[in-house]
Image (tube, rainbow, N blue to C red):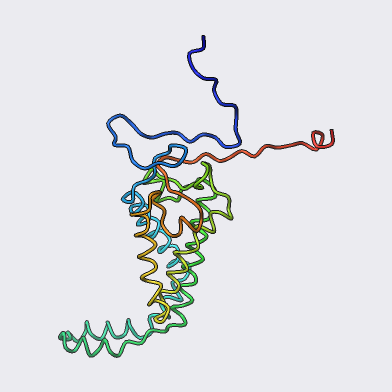
């Protein structure tokens, strides 16, 4: 008799490798049994990616950021050279005037960098630089594989948009709490999905993603 069942036939999506080793405690998994990434590893990846996107945004939009600081550098220089006391420093702080339109342009640059960075890497390898360093990746909830550009962009929009809104005093009143809520939802959600995960219909899992190979049909095959 046969020792086991027949192996399943080839499907449209490659199976994702399991990463539970001996001695590891079982945790929540996707429907097809892939372990979900821990929130700690996701935070580490977020910290790396945030530092990278901030640096890229500052490189591309540093002029706008400098203009947005208004008279802040001048006030700081005055406080340092005069050896201002805490009381004097408080008085100087009241004179600070940021140039909000320029700061808004810088925030827009950061938005474009953030969306572009995450969309590019998630649609190519399923993981940003930070996620690769943490050994995790992003996939659709219902199946493994690298995200399409449209899926990657949909998932990547929320946090850069909230950052843009956070730079505006009136909008920051709801943007900052919503940013915190977005992160916290992953803690209690059974699939560890944050708000931007649910918008993108994605989950974050341990291990890499494989690019789905679309079947190619030649013209001769179509005409036959």
**Outermost residue, top side:** 1
Residue 89 in the image: state x and y as whole percent.
21, 86
Assign the C terminus to one quadrant of the image: top right
Identify which residue, 72 or 124, lies in the foreground. 124
Above or below, 88 against 26 in this view is below
**Outermost residue, front side:** 1
Above or below, 46 against 140 in this view is below
Above or below, 121 against 35 in this view is below
Residue 218 in the image: state x and y as whole percent.
77, 36
Identify which residue, 181 or 94, lies in the foreground. 181
Residue at left offset 54%, top offset 35%? 14
Identify which residue, 58 or 53, lies in the foreground. 53
Residue 84 in the image: state x and y as whole percent.
18, 86
Above or below, 16 against 127 in this view is above
Identify which residue, 192 or 165, lies in the foreground. 192
Instruction: Say left or right for 217 vs 68.
Output: right
**Outermost residue, right side:** 223
Instruction: Say left or right for 91 vs 37.
Output: left
Instruction: Say left or right for 171 vs 1.
Output: left
Q: Quadrant of residue 99?
A: bottom left
Residue at left offset 42%, top offset 75%? 65
Residue 27 in the image: state x and y as whole percent.
33, 41
How many tags in the picture? 0
């Amino acid at each position: 008799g046969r020792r086991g069942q027949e192996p399943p036939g080839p499907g449209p999506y490659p199976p994702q490798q399991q990463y539970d080793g001996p001695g590891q405690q079982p945790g929540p998994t996707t429907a097809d049994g892939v372990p979900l990434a821990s929130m700690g590893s996701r935070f580490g990846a977020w910290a790396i990616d945030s530092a990278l996107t901030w640096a890229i945004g500052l490189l591309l939009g540093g002029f706008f950021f400098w203009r947005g600081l208004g008279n802040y550098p001048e006030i700081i220089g005055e406080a340092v050279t005069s050896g201002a006391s805490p009381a004097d420093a408080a008085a100087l702080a009241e004179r600070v005037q940021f140039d909000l339109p320029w700061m808004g342009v810088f925030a827009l640059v950061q938005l474009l960098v953030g969306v572009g960075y995450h969309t590019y890497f998630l649609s190519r390898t399923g993981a940003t630089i930070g996620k690769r360093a943490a050994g995790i990746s992003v996939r659709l909830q219902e199946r493994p594989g690298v995200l399409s550009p449209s899926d990657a962009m949909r998932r990547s929009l929320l946090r850069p948009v909230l950052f843009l809104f956070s730079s505006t005093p009136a909008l920051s009143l709801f943007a900052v709490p919503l940013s915190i809520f977005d992160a916290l939802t992953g803690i209690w959600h059974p699939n560890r999905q944050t708000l931007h995960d649910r918008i993108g219909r994605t989950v974050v899992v341990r291990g890499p993603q494989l690019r789905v190979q679309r079947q190619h049909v030649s013209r001769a095959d179509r005409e036959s």
